[in-house]
Image (spheres, rainbow, N blue to C red):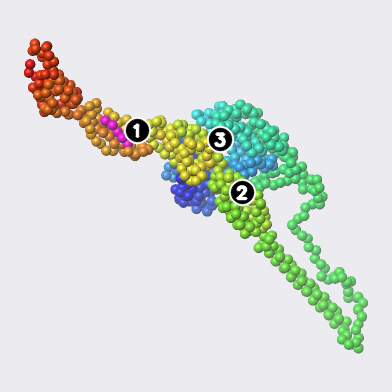
Amino acid sequence: MSTNAATDPMIGRMIDQRYRVRSRIARGGMATVYLATDVRLERRVAIKIMHGHLADDQAFRERFIQEARSAARLSHPNLVGVYDQGAEDDTAYIVMEYIPGITLRDLLQEHHALTPEQATDILRAVLAGLASAHRAGIVHRDLKPENVLLADDGRIKLGDFGLARATTANTATGAALLGTIAYLSPELVTRGAADSRSDIYALGIMLYEMLTGEQPYKGDQPMQIAYQHANDTVPLPSAAVDGVPPELDDLVAWATARNPDDRPRDAREMLDHMAGNQQRATGQYRTAVLRPENATAILPSGGGGAGSGAGAPASPPATDATAVIPRDRATDPGRPARGRNAPPGPRRTGSQPGALSPAAQRLADLSGKRRKRGWAALAIVVVLALVAAGIAFWFGPGPGGNVRIPAVAGKSVSQARQLLEAQGLHTASKTGTRFDAVVAKGQVSATEPAAAREVRKGTAVRIVVSNGPRMIALPAIVGQPLSTVTAALDDDFELQDDRYQFSADAPEDTVIAATGRGADGERLDLSTVKAYGETGPVTLTVSLGPVPDLAGKTVEQATAALDDVGLVLGAQSEEYDESVPQGQIVSASVQDSPVVRGSTVDVVVSKGPTPIVIPEDGVVGATINEATATLRGLGLQVSVPDCTNILCGFYDWKSKLPVTGTDPGVGATVHRGDTVTLAYDQ
């Protein structure tokens, strides 16, 4: 992408002697977000660094710092935390909590639409975080799926308070509307004013999109979508897809009411309403977000305890403790106790061979029992050891063990299958597809479950193949003001550093060309295509206006005019010119194409009119007509005194009489347009 993560000068840089930048995560309209290491606290953080070309724009700097202040005032498990803020070398930055995972937009692109339970789960978590912001008097004003982060460990967080403002600052935004057009409330479109109810409207649009997989309003131009927000009623999700519960239809209708007074007044009211409807859950199960970890749990419907559901066991749940009842070592349950007064057993008489005395017999019996118990215990230990070894083998290197799914993104499908099967995993026969702005079309984009997840051996893994970047319709670019084009492209594409050149056909700050990168990696003229891949690099060529007109200026005046626009006065040559006074510029030319700042402009300076020496040949001795023709051919005017001889009236005397001299005389220097008087004998 011309300037991509691999060549980003920020990679590897140490900021404020504390934050080591590791890699680039994302790029937005105001800033780029990097993964960094806080070397002081030895933890990973996300650091947002404002674009360098915005450093001189005070409005952007204030908005950037406002984001840090707004977010730093909030502390909630469902909000991205802000750790630090500062500036270095005129570059402002914000240090935030790093959330490894995906965005809600990524989830929607992968699954298209979510189940009502999943949508409710995510909405409740976002409302919890937003309620904390509304309680602190902060309106987000830019709610969209890109700003909802779904962490790998199940947490759901709301971030990017770059457009946040205090709820008392409800004035119009001026010439441009802030926020993404697809989620703007009617009052933002018509009046440019926003409060907490504007956030609720955006959440209603997000809920509709989660349930249906698409936004309610579509159009070729942003203003068409804005018009629908201002004048139409958002349709019910159940009209687009089946299986949406009436409760969620009502929630979308309530949140997206065109009149702000008909919506929930803030996120807390909407969250409390959802909590009141918890018992009327959608489907057989309901989804709950458990705080503070925000883990998702699927609970039986009905709201009862463990034993209140249909078919639930009546007995209490088993505990982890097991009671052990000790055996009375003094009593053998297998035979009656022999007390001190118990009758003795039969005696063996000494006459019987090998006969034992009663006391010896009792000792022999006791020893035998102990040996049997020892062998039994040993057998139990051996069996338990074998069972433990078998279990360890099964759940270790054996078929029942756990393995981590290898990373196969960017590889071919066959390579991915080999890597997965080498880990003891099965690959699903059918592959999925999704748009991917990074991985080339036809290569593996991801796996389901995701890479690095720990699963049982033998688990079926589905390979998801990249369809390449999602193609997005391009707006009008060439001939449009730079600010308009930048605003239209910045959300969907990666804008590179603009190129500037002089153009005689376009006013200053007008886009005269746009280039991207084709599928073959070659330069692509975006004015020749109607759609372009999402997050693709875009380089805009911007007009600096025409090269200053230097004709008629002195060299000093021309030098000053060129300096003002970044051009340099080059070679100077001189020539005679009949119409331009001496010392003024006759013409200018530039060798570079295109003409950019730093190009040199060569000039031709006038030496005044061309000098002419009055010749003798063709003048003196020639007839008056011949001399007149010669001098006029040199650009001179000719004056002939009238003939006073009476004979001149009887013949063509100018064609007969010879010229005897001139005034000025022969050899004199004159200039084009000067008058020469001829002398002749009458």
Q: Nearer the viewer, mark 3 or mark 1?
A: 1
Q: Nearer the viewer, mark 2 or mark 3?
A: 2
x, y (%) of residue 665? 10, 25
Label 3, on which residue? Answer: 180
Q: Is mark 3 on a helix, strand or loop?
A: loop
Amino acid type indicated by mark 3 = Thr
Label 1, on which residue? Answer: 547
Q: Nearer the viewer, residue 297 or 71?
A: 297
Amino acid type indicated by mark 2 = Val
Work out which quarter of the rendered image holds the C terminus and state it. Answer: top left
Describe residue 211's horizontal placement relative to residue 445 as left or right. Answer: right
x, y (%) of residue 470? 56, 41
The answer to whether the residue labelled 3 contacts the one labelled 1, judged by CB atoms less than 8 Å apart, is no
Q: Which of 202 and 667 is in front in this view?
A: 667
Q: Which mark is residue 615?
A: none
Q: Residue at x 65, y 36 (%)?
A: 208
Looking at the image, can residue 76 be seen? Answer: no
Q: Quadrant of residue 214?
A: top right
Label 2, on which residue? Answer: 464
Which range is magenta?
586-590
- Crowd around label 1: few <14 · some 14–19 · many ≥20 (10 Å): many
The answer to whether the residue labelled 2 contacts the one labelled 1, judged by CB atoms less than 8 Å apart, is no
